[in-house]
Image: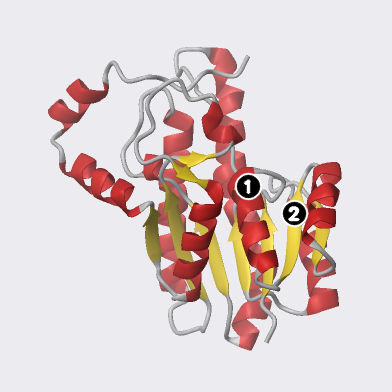
């Protein structure tokens, strides 16, 4: 049976890497993002089983239209991956950063819900499928300067956990993937060391394997999972001392 995969945030980074991985395996892949010109170029690269849909995960109506168009043509997808995301440094003392914080939360958190929602009823009716939320190791412990991103990814982890329990016994799986540092345009501008930096194609292969295996939660690479557990176990006074002078994500200009 040909696998059917719907990916948001597919125009670059992790989303594009996942699209390339699934397309190389012969899957029917829906590329979804705001930049249709970029998606069309990726579609031309990946072949006839790939289609492009212009949609914005902060606009539920546009995502619903893309979802319905895909299902009308191919049926219910086997895998839906909520990959659209933004990472922008913020300063909570600055009023101009409030809308930036909102943008990050809307894209990363509400965008996950908006990606999943159009498929849920159909997946539950067919009693199969996987909903995949792309979280981050940054959601396990708050990173200074990345308050919006850390908060959003912590929310994705908690949301996917809640949804996973809600759907228990329905036949629909919920998978949380928490990347560490992956080599993408999002991390290119980080002005600090990035331990265990992983190439996007390597990440995509490992994420796809975790999804296929039905894992509920996976940190990629695994070494960052160990680091995250250690950081989570640190008392606040020690964590604060270690990270108070850490490099900060640049603010939006």
Q: In the image, is 45 to the left or to the right of 175?
A: right
Q: How many labels sit on residues?
A: 2
- The answer to whether any part of residue 26 appears in the image is yes
Q: Which circle marks residue 32 in the picture?
A: 2
Measured Cα–Cα span from mark 1 to mark 2 = 9 Å
Q: Residue at x 81, y 43 (%)?
A: 38
Name the colour scheme.
secondary structure
Q: Residue at x 20, y 30 (%)?
A: 239
Q: Would you say the residues marked 1 and 2 are in contact, meaning their CB atoms lie under 8 Å apart?
A: yes
Q: Quadrant of residue 63?
A: bottom right
Q: Which residue is drawn at 24% across and 49% down?
A: 226
Residue 118 is situated, as x and y percent measured from the top left of the image, at 70, 66
Q: In the image, is 55 to the left or to the right of 171?
A: right
- The answer to whether any part of residue 61 appears in the image is no
Above or below, 83 against 81 in this view is above
Q: Quadrant of the N terminus?
A: bottom right
Residue 204 is situated, as x and y percent measured from the top left of the image, at 54, 57
Q: Which of marks 1 and 2 is nearer the N terminus?
A: 2
Above or below, 211 against 234 in this view is below
Residue at the disc numbered 1: 84
Q: Residues within 10 Å of mark 2 (few under 14, many from 20)?
A: many
């Amino acid at each position: 049976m040909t696998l059917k995969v719907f990916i948001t945030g597919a125009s670059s980074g992790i989303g594009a890497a996942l699209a390339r991985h699934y397309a190389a395996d012969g899957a029917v892949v829906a590329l979804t993002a705001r930049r249709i010109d970029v998606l069309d170029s990726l579609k031309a690269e990946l072949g006839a089983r790939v289609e492009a849909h212009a949609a914005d995960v902060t606009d539920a109506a546009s995502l619903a239209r893309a979802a319905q168009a895909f299902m009308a043509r191919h049926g219910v997808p086997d895998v839906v991956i909520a990959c659209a995301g933004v990472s922008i440094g913020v300063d909570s003392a600055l009023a101009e950063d409030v809308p930036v914080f909102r943008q990050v939360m809307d894209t990363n958190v509400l965008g996950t819900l908006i990606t999943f929602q159009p498929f849920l009823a159909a997946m539950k009716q067919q009693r199969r499928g996987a909903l995949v939320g792309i979280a981050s190791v940054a959601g396990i412990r708050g990173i200074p300067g990345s308050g919006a991103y850390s908060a959003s990814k912590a929310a994705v982890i908690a949301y996917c956990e809640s949804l996973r329990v809600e759907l228990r016994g329905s036949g629909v799986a919920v998978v949380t993937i928490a990347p560490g540092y992956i080599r993408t345009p999002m991390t290119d501008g980080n002005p600090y060391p990035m331990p265990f930096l992983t190439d996007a194609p390597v990440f995509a292969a490992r994420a796809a394997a975790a999804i296929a295996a039905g894992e509920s939660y996976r940190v990629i690479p695994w070494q960052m999972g160990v680091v995250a557990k250690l950081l989570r176990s640190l008392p606040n006074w020690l964590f604060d001392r270690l990270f108070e002078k850490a490099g900060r994500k640049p603010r939006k200009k």
